[in-house]
Image: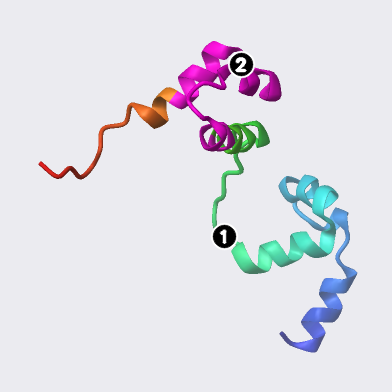
Amino acid sequence: MEIWVQKIIMQITLDDLPESYQEIARIIGVESAVKLSEALGGLAYYFPQLEGILRKKRDECIKREFTGDNHRELAKKYDLTERWIREIVEIRYNQPALFTDE
């Protein structure tokens, strides 16, 4: 990057950014927002809500920790109902096998 470009970038403030980017810059900082613009400018991105990301990771943990008979413990640990734990682990144990020896 040219030196004059770097100097100008250092002078960019929140008010210099388009309104749609100002919220991002408030969260991650102007310098980081400018870096995102440089790397991804012109592309459209969707950021999923954190809740969805956490839910997916939580379900992975539940499936990994499930022993076959610990529904109640997992329900307490993850603040869910036993029924919901059963729903989550059913997906793991009732999926058809892709490859069989038959």
Q: Exactly how many numbered labels are in the figure?
A: 2
Q: What residue type is labelled 2?
A: Arg
Residue 98 position by quadrant: top left
Q: Where is residue 47 in the image (x, y as percent from the top left)?
A: 61, 43
Q: Position of residue 79 (x, y in %)?
A: 69, 19
Give the quadrant of the C terminus. top left
Magenta segment range? 60-89
Residue 80 lies in the magenta-colored region: yes
Look at the numbered disc 2 and give the secondary structure of its residue: helix
Mark 2–mark 1 distance (CA, rounded to whole Å): 49 Å
Residue 100 lies in the magenta-colored region: no
* Residue bearing the label numbered 2: 72
Q: What residue type is labelled 1?
A: Gly
Residue 100 position by quadrant: top left
Q: Relative to 78, does residue 43 appear above or below in the rendering?
A: below
Give me the residue at 51% from left, 33% from top.
63
Look at the numbered disc 1 and give the secondary structure of its residue: loop
Q: Position of residue 57 (x, y in %)?
A: 59, 38
Seen from the viewer's position, the closer of residues 70 and 90 is 70
Looking at the picture, the colour scheme in use is: rainbow
Seen from the viewer's position, the closer of residues 79 and 23 is 79
Most extreme residue toward the bottom, as rendered?
A: 3
